[in-house]
Amino acid sequence: MRSKKAGWVSLFILLALLLPSLVFAEDFTATVHKYPYRVPDLTVIGAPVSYTVRPKDTLLDIARRNDLGFNSIRLLYPKMDAWLPPKGKRIFVPTFFVLPPSKNYQLVVNIPEMRLYYFNQADSTVQTYPIGIGVEGWECPVGDFFVNYKTDHPTWYVPASLQAKYGMTSMPPGPDNPLGDYIMKFSAGDYGIHGTSMPWGVGRLVSHGCIRCYPENIRILYPQVPLKTKLEIIYEPVKFGMRNGRIFVQAYPDVYNKIDNYAQYALAKLSQYPFAKNVDQQKLMVAISLQNGVPTDVTKDNFKDDSLKLVEMPR
């Protein structure tokens, strides 16, 4: 299983290097989306959209254009050609999320989801951005940390284990620097949240333990996050949330193979959820079996909630 996964990762990286003109040719810009939240009864944010595949689109373009990582699209369309999706096809884009559990609600990174959340407690809003994470063997650390260093246009001091590969001990700022234009280090050693020179890696296991953001997203996030901001890095493939009285579950694959029995794990999480008695376990098991990252209504009754209706993307 793991060797097959590694083979696909290698092929993907090779294609991205060989076909740079097909990937992210446009100039991507980000819009700041601040979603209101309230614990515990408003913890599902955003809304799904429909998207019509354009000429020359790749799934990576579609993901980035909708502020998603590649994983969010690939989990829904595992058989679709990532480089040549069917032109004119209308697809579902899951631009809505269950908030991760948090102790402090400041800066939260959820590893299996490959997503970051930045909470502003002053106005009870949250922003969320996709990320790339560490490959197996170079996993991102999990725990409670704080931001202890920030700089723009950073120099990359190449780890000793990679110096032979890159032929240098340090790399100056520039378009090839894998740290991108901004980095925020945190109190876990030599780890950071930073931009990237390879945006196709967002939503994938690509780094040596650092957390990579799209260049346009780190540009937004960096000035907002002060030093000493608390950072929680969690491993939560199953999240429960609520909106308009409806309960949703969002389930992702166990990317680091930490869980022996996924169904038992999900039921244990359910037992800790305050509104567990209102969850239909049959619906829950369907969502758990799919693990496609789409928030799924698992409420017991048949109440229709139109707050998550599809929104047509402008062309």
Image (cartoon, rainbow, N blue to C red):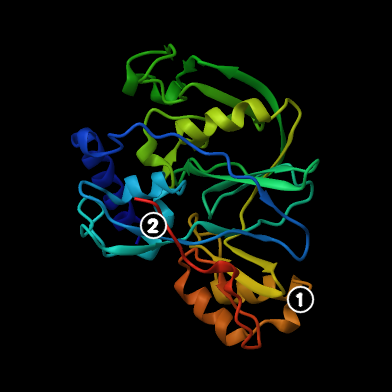
**Quarter where residue 22 is shown:** top left
71 sits left or right of 152 in the view? left
* Number of disc labels: 2
**Which residue is painted at 43% across and 42% down in the image?**
202
Amino acid marked by disc 1: Phe
**Which residue is painted at 70% across and 71% down in the image?**
244
Within 10 Å of the Cα at label 2, are there few (<14), some (14-19), or many (20+) other Cα atoms? Answer: many
Residue 176 spot, x, y in % from top left? 35, 20
Mark 1 or 2, nearer chain start = 2
The front one of 7 and 222 is 222
| Mark 1 lies on residue | 275
92 sits left or right of 83 in the view? right
Within 10 Å of the Cα at label 1, are there few (<14), some (14-19), or many (20+) other Cα atoms? Answer: some
Amino acid marked by disc 2: Ile
The vertical placement of 149 against 24, above or below, is above
SS under mark 2:
helix
The front one of 307 and 166 is 307
Does the rendering let one see residue 234? yes
Q: Which mark is residue 73?
A: 2
**Which residue is painted at 39% across and 40% down in the image?**
201
Residue 301 spot, x, y in % from top left? 65, 88
Residue 241 spot, x, y in % from top left? 67, 66
**Cα–Cα gap, marks 1 and 2:** 30 Å
**Which residue is painted at 71% across and 57% down in the image?**
101
146 sits left or right of 167 in the view? right
